[in-house]
Image: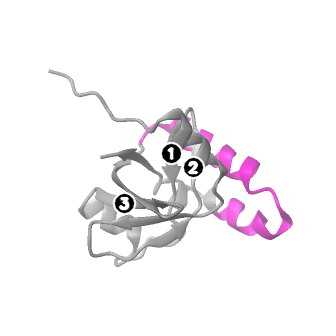
Amino acid sequence: MTSVRQRFSAADIRILDGLKILGVRAGTTHRHTGVWPIVVEGRLFVRSWNDKPTGWYRAFLAEPCGSITMGKQERSVRALHVRSARLIHAVTAAYAAKYDTKASEKWVRGFAEPVREATTLELVPE
């Protein structure tokens, strides 16, 4: 039996794509942290800047269930580690397209580094 992966609605994807910052929380005890959300192919992706042992990325690896905040609404999500080179490169390109200000250049270049590309997660509704 195959499982069908949940997807965000088209309306939710439009909202998520318009956000510059998205609150994420891994598990139920980790605090909400602001991250840069990226939408590629109608799917939500996030990437960690600092892969700290106590950070949100590692918390999601240990416990893939968590939540995001969309405005005042909290939504349950599951984090899936992205292994597809095609998707990882598409997310990198989407960061450069979405965050195209002079102030964002340092961060966009950093997100293109292989060590950070390896932290790409897809968030799906739980």
Mark 3–mark 1 distance (CA, rounded to whole Å): 13 Å
Q: Decide: few, some or many residues near mark 1? Use Cα within 10 Å; few <14, some 14-19, many ≥20.
A: many
* Residue 67 tag number: 3
Question: Residue 110: x percent and y percent?
Answer: 65, 64
**Residue 109 belongs to magenta span:** yes
**Residue 68 belongs to magenta span:** no
- Furthest-top residue in this view: 1
**Label 1 vs label 2, nearer the camera:** 2
- Lateral position of residue 78 relative to residue 34, left or right: left
Figure colour scheme: one colour
Compared with 104, 112 (above or below) is: above
Mark 1–mark 2 distance (CA, rounded to whole Å): 8 Å
Question: Residue 105: x percent and y percent?
Answer: 78, 64
User: Mark 2 or 3 closer to N-term?
Assistant: 2
Quick check: can you spot residue 89? no
Compared with 79, 3 (above or below) is: above
- Lateral position of residue 25 relative to residue 3, left or right: right
Secondary structure beneath label 2:
helix
Which picture quadrant has residue 1? top left
Secondary structure beneath label 3:
strand
Amino acid type of the residue that numbered disc 3 sits on in the rendered structure: Ser
In this view, the residue in front, 18 or 56, is: 18
User: Mark 3 or 1 closer to N-term?
Assistant: 1
The residue to which callout 1 is attached is 44
Mark 1–mark 2 contact, CB under 8 Å? Answer: yes
In this view, the residue in front, 32 or 40, is: 32
Question: Residue 117: x percent and y percent?
Answer: 53, 54
Amino acid type of the residue that numbered disc 2 sits on in the rendered structure: Leu
Magenta segment boundaries in residue numbering: 83-110
Q: Decide: few, some or many residues near mark 3? Use Cα within 10 Å; few <14, some 14-19, many ≥20.
A: many
Amino acid type of the residue that numbered disc 1 sits on in the rendered structure: Leu
